[in-house]
Amino acid sequence: MPALRSFTGYFYPGFLLHTLYFCRRSIDRIQVKKPWLYAFVKRAVFYNDTIILAAIMASEKLALIINSIPAVTASDDEIYRHWLAISDPQYFSYVTQYSAFDVQAARELGYYGYDTKPFKQYLSLKTTKDYLRRLMVPDGQEHIKWTSALVKRTEKFLEKNDYPMIFIYGAIDPWTASGVTDPKFFKGKENMHLFNDEGNSHRAKIGNVSAKNRNEILRLLTEWLGEQPFVQ
């Protein structure tokens, strides 16, 4: 898990991201020579005998990143610096690109909490209660009160309507807990569809869900749009 978290942390910046194109023969060579890379490759989308890999790092750079993860014998300072490099704590601040969302979360959407009890002996922090309002909303907005009006309105809309809508989530994504996944929203519906893709993450999308789910999603879109959509 630490390696996965480190990979994810480095994955977001973007300066290492690019698109790679592999034919099926290349995939066979990768499977033999670089099994760890093949694990990512095998879930890609087949399109006209070509696997289109969007936002996958070059194997050499990915290897360098993985090798940069400190060993379990590393010093506390080395591990701490690595954590800062992959997960900047500035996220827990009102000076971020997410300020507008933080205000909406405090007012309408709600926000998750942190259970710090297992780490109590290591922390000077007494509580994380209401940390969003205390740390992350802009100055002058600390007293925003949360209201359930939007949540209830959204739930009512989903329960009473059956518009052509597709909800795609990754089954191992913690954020899926706040998704439209309750069976009550889909019971007896013909047009609303849920795809909670097994083993997929926060990056779940049409292009990287399982073949079964992808085929069904494309079938629905083709039926609704009247033409075959292009998915990369």
Image (cartoon, rainbow, N blue to C red):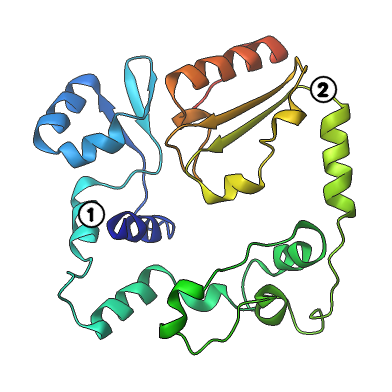
The quarter of the displayed image where residue 32 is located? top left
Number of other residues with Cα within 10 Å of mark 2, as a class: few under 14, some 14 to 19, many 20 or more: some
* Above or below, comparing residue 175 to residue 230 in the picture: below
Number of other residues with Cα within 10 Å of mark 1, as a class: few under 14, some 14 to 19, many 20 or more: few
Q: Which mark is residue 204?
A: none
**Residue 145 relative to residue 30: left or right:** right
Q: Position of residue 111 (x, y in %)?
A: 68, 62
Q: CA distance from mark 2 to mark 1?
A: 46 Å
Q: Please name the residue shown 82% across and 65% down the image.
A: 107
Determine contact: label 2, label 1, CB under 8 Å.
no
Q: Position of residue 124 (x, y in %)?
A: 49, 90
Label 1 sits on what residue type? Lys
Report the mark closest to the observer, 2 or 1.
2
Label 2 sits on what residue type? Asp
The residue tagged with tag 1: helix, strand or loop?
A: helix
The residue tagged with tag 2: helix, strand or loop?
A: loop
- Residue identifier under label 2: 162
Q: Position of residue 169 (x, y in %)?
A: 56, 37
Between 155 and 27, the one nearer to me in the picture: 155
- Residue identifier under label 1: 61
* Above or below, comparing residue 185 to residue 101 in the picture: above
Q: Please name the residue shown 70% across and 29% down the image.
A: 183
Between 163 and 65, the one nearer to me in the picture: 163
Image quarter in which the N terminus is found = bottom left
Task: Count up the numbered dots.
Answer: 2
> Furthest residue to the bottom?
124
* Disc with the residue nearer the chain's start (2 vs 1): 1
Q: Position of residue 78 (x, y in %)?
A: 24, 80
Q: Please name the residue shown 75% across and 14% down the image.
A: 190
